[in-house]
Image: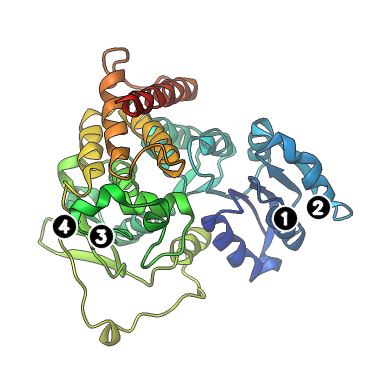
Amino acid sequence: MRSVSIFGATGSIGQNTVDLIARDPGAYRVVALTGGANIAQLAEDAIRLKAEVAVTAHDDRLDDLRAALAGSGVEATAGQGALVEAADRPADWVMSAIVGAAGLAPGFRALRHGTTLALANKESLVTAGPLLLAEARAHGATILPVDSEHSAVFQALVGEEMEAVEKIIITASGGGLRDWPLEALPKATVADAGAHPNWAMGQRITIDSASMFNKGMELIETKEFFGVGPDRIEAVVHPQSIVHALVGFRDGALMAHLGAPDMRHAIGYALHWPDRRELPVARIDLAQIATLEFYAPDLVRYPALRIAREVMEAGGRSGAVFNAAKEIALDAFIAGRIGFMQMSEVVDRTLSAISPRLCLVSPMSGLEDVLHTDHMARNTAWSEIEKMERT
């Protein structure tokens, strides 16, 4: 019986992971489930999976969680410290699906136990990729990608040598606004950007898909995880979301991973790796699909891709600033303080404002350094938003 923990259990990735675990409960011992404000869902899943501990990130919701778990035998804890303590409970397999920089510390802590870390937290590689990979090597831990694109690349590389790889191509749906006229994008609302044509995801990642900030994050992740230069990484718009990534080799071959737009593909692959097991996902009928489209992204429509490429080239602390500014810009857009196209302007301005104060190309010395950079970038981003509001 494998022991597992799910960090970010109440989000879309976490719920898909819970679904797979619940289909074969006798195969797993659930150590920890963590979530945010959705106490009812967290408690329901913790009881159903017989978790040892359930953790809410919100200290002020501890009494609610205890009440929801009363009589179940599941321990209830709360707060950021409790998240790290839960990661200190050894598990064979840990899903890292907490959204944002809050997922960094639990992921790092879990690696100390030599576990297999299924990584859905984009921020870990974007902000601290070299540190995270070094931590895994130091403790004999394994990191498996759970983003559908990076899982696809990982699978296409099975049995291959990285020296033979010419390029890695990750695909993007283009998001819910991909067919809007360019001049209409500044007026896009949160509801407009929060509707995805292919994937069922949370609000924040869906808006990030519309702006392509999620794809910018994934470009940086590709560089960090697979160790390839920015010049060998591409993104293409693929409206059908059937091909998740392609790997090009020096003999001219392209290996593509195809699958229905269902995150249980990537989660299930990481859960059962190195084996393949049956998954409850739709099978593709190519004759019914008939056409697969690909085209180059418009960098005027998607400036996030241009900024991400600059960050890849710079390296160092740039990824931490990029991610923090992106999160704050998204907060401001959701709050109605800036427009849709102004999110990229916030990130651009934050990177420029911080450059004179912090050598962005210098490497991180440790997790505290990452968190310090993250904090500085968030404050700077809010300052830039306030300047924009005054003009």
Which residue is the extreme one toward the top?
357
In primary-sequence order, the first of circles 1 and 2 is 1
The x, y position of residue 74, in whole percent, is: 80, 50
Task: Compute the Cα span from label 1 to label 2.
Answer: 7 Å
Which residue is the extreme one toward the front?
391
Task: Compute the Cα span from label 4 to label 1.
Answer: 48 Å
> From the viewer's perspective, is the residue at label 3 or at label 4 nearer?
3
Residue 35 visible within the image:
yes
Q: Secondary structure at mark 3?
A: loop
Q: Which residue is mark 1?
A: 40
**Which amino acid type is shown beneath numbered disc 3?**
Arg
Task: Compute the Cα span from label 3 to label 4.
Answer: 30 Å
Q: Which residue is mark 2?
A: 68
In primary-sequence order, the first of circles 4 and 1 is 1
The quarter of the rendered structure image containing the C terminus is top left
Number of marks drawn: 4
> Which residue is rendered at x = 63% and y = 34% of the image?
84
Q: Could you say which is closer to the camera, residue 298 or residue 216?
A: 298
Q: Secondary structure at mark 1?
A: helix
On the image, which quarter does residue 127 sit in?
A: top left
**Which amino acid type is shown beneath numbered disc 2?**
Ala
Q: Determine whether label 2 and label 3 are within 8 Å by CB.
A: no
> Which residue is rendered at x = 35% and y = 29% of the image?
389
Q: Determine whether label 1 and label 2 are within 8 Å by CB.
A: yes
Q: Secondary structure at mark 4?
A: strand
Residue 269 has which mark? Answer: none
